[in-house]
Amino acid sequence: LSEQGKTSRARFRLFEDAEKGGIFTSDEGWLVAAPTSTGKSYIGIEAIKRQLPSKPRMECFVYLVPFKALAEEMYTKIKKVVPPETRVHIKTGDYDKPFQAKETDVLVATYESLDGMVQEGVDFYPTLIVADEFSIIADETRGARIEALVAFLAKQKEGTKLFALSAVLNKPEELAAWLGLKLLKGTEKHRPVPLDVECVKYSDKLDTVRRLLKEGLDYGSVVIFCYTKKSVEKACDDIKDLVLKKLSPGEEERCRIEAQRLKNDFDYLVKPPELVPYGVAYHHAGLEVGVRNRIAELFEQRVVRVVAATTTVGAGVNMPARYVIIRDVFRDRRLLPVSVAVNMLGRAGRPPYDSRGTGYFMVDKERVARPNYSDFIDKVLKREIEPIESKIPASTSNILGFILSTAARMKGVTRDELASVYNTTLAGSRDPLEVPLPSKENLLANIEKLVQPPKKPTKVDQRTLRVSSGTIQINGGSGGYLITMSEKRSTCGCWDWKRHRGIQDCKHIEQLRYEAITGPFGAKNSEARAIAIAAFKGRGLARQPMYMISQGIELLMQWEFLAEKEGKLHITSDGRQALVSYRLDMEHVRRLRDTIRKNPAARDENDVIKWAIGDFGVPALLADQNGNEDDEDEEEKDVDDGSLDPELEDALWKHIENVPYKKVVNQSNVVRFLDAKETLEQIFGAYLTFVNKDDKRLGKLIRVARNRVHYGCTKELLPLMVLELEAVSDPLIALKLNNEGITKVQDLVRLDYESFWKTTGVGPDACRRSIEQANSIARLVSEFSGLRSDLNRLAAQTEVKIDDLFDYLLPPDMVDRLRK
Ligand SMILES: [Zn+2]
């Protein structure tokens, strides 16, 4: 049997149950909840494969995943199993190539990018949706938005069949009922190899890891999860001698060759090529996707024997091993959720090599007796995971996102409709809102009842009130104490507050809250009131979504993100921008609007880039200083004060002058640089929405700034770079062409492929294809009708973004007409 054959046979148990249960033939949607590595994704892919032949050509199937890297993996897998003529596309970001539903059979996308399309009202009707790693709806930061999307797809979209795939869930029956899906439940018995889980209590961490490794390496490969990026790299240094001893001379040689290959392909890398000769590697968010994939490959081929990874990337690591060791059982300064720990341990045991898998999780002997630890240990051993909690009512910003995205998806909603939509979410199915919603006045009266007048009345100085970034600041009390109040935390400068460390509110905070919620300045400033209500949530208005929704609507109207017309709430164009800039929170988008509406003067696009750097973060008036007892490693804390790191800023300025970023960014910062770049692109996107449409010059400067940051080049090279030709993937190549006077698509069309090849030094095949590509773009542009309705098709066919078609390819008079 081939390896592939053995693997799929090992996966058969869950698959057989799926087949018997009629998953592939029934008209209903399904929730498949089963342990890690029981082959859930295969069921999703098979569902797509079997229903493809009966899919009408205009319709589209969608496979959703939570991570970009996973999207690429699934894209490759799906392409392999569907007939070659199937049009499979991938969408993972907001700056992708334009998407044409009518020219797509299967779309692999991240949840957020599909949500973006639904909200923009892109005209397509997915009839089958596979939602993989569905428990992502419990994620602190992304869950709320994804939950609302899934509820919408399952409940409001007629004729959409949903397959939700998830690791083991607590009460899967409840989730299936919520979404109206049938349930296929997998158990430990469905795992192709049995799994043993053990808690290892240690007094010396390093000794213990080395002991476990020494025993384990005789039987197979090992993945170790550690707390931070630094600790992951250090863990590799601590164990590499031990791993090297287990390699045969032949294996050692292979490791050296692969290390050299890694160095050749990613010449900026330092640490990983030093480790691979020992049969060791690491995997964390600081490595770019290409490197991570290579390491996963080397691990799969058993060249690399041990991989250390951060607990943060745990969910995205698809590297089954004979042993999994969770060295540090915490992340973000807290104990890991049981579900996350169980999911990581579940990667132990890889068919067909291993007959068993073993998962260890290590706990400090000193801590074992603490109640939260003993509870954690007990639950992990029993694999008793926590129920999924909806994140929609968990914070004001999640509620704001819910309101705004619902108004967008539904193309306008009444307040009562909004409440009904809320009731289709997991949060609402558990704890429904009453519909119709109580009137604004009644709600407020209810809130006011909950807020008691302070027992010791004092004065807060209303003239000093500042409201910004979700925080109220005001001087209070005769001593002029500074009070700050936000959803996360309220502080006061008075002695009383310091004595209680904020566990008990001082009289100033009580007074401020009372006045902001019931008093005149709350009535005048609904933002201050919303903040005070959010800050009070934990104490009096414990998770009462009704108040949050009602206040949220007021807030969004004040920000001009929502407008009320004939009783319906509509998203404004500003609100739409706030929604699509999902890397930025709404407060941030509001600040970007302020920057542009001040009518600033820009000499050139560099000034625009300077604004964006200045607007990069929202300076929080108050940092979240919560300490936590699980803060074991002080060695690294990703401090984020919101602004752009000077190293990254310096790299950015070089990057836009044709210097490849990998030459200027420290290797451990590559991913942070790429993230910053993406955030900047969203900031430019927001500027573009808010810029005065008559100020054509400024609009153009913003677009040039965005493109220079995106492509990493000078302005002269943009007409070539925006074509995204295969042979001109790098600004340095565009520069060579530019030096020969070849600056735009018309010049390329006149070029024969040999001189193209000589000028660029790129492989002849790529050159030939690029010349063809340029010719086809030029032809499509010249044949363009000038009709707005054909614009999307032109963008999809040329694979050039609409803004770039306008700026670099279409005749100016036509552009003026189309832009109106
Ligand atoms: Zn005080």
Image (spheres, rainbow, N blue to C red):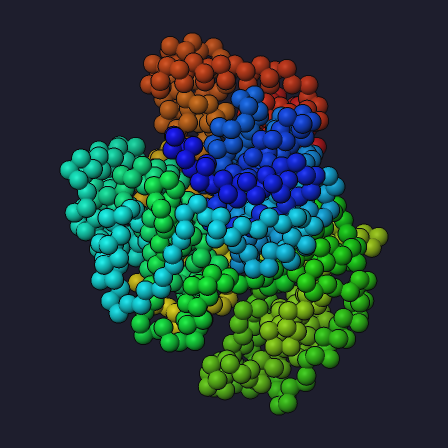
Residue displayed at 80% across by 72% down? 442
Q: 632 or 270: nearer the eye?
A: 632
Position of 767 relative to 8 (above/below):
above
Left or right side of 671 for 690: right
Residue 105 position by quadrant: top right
Residue displayed at 31% across by 49% down? 222
Position of 490 relative to 334 (above/below):
below
Q: 741 or 589: nearer the eye?
A: 589
Position of 202 relative to 127 (above/below):
below
Q: 189 or 702: nearer the eye?
A: 189
Q: Quadrant of the N terminus?
A: top left
Rendering coords of residue 97 (x, y %): 55, 31
Residue displayed at 57% across by 24% down? 86
User: Does the rendering let one see residue 277?
Assistant: yes
Rendering coords of residue 122 (x, y %): 67, 36
Residue displayed at 64% across by 90% down? 455
Q: Quadrant of the C terminus?
A: top right
Rendering coords of residue 235 (x, y %): 26, 55
Q: 642 or 108: nearer the eye?
A: 108
Tag count: 0
User: Does the rendering let one see residue 97?
Assistant: no
Left or right side of 301 for 278: left
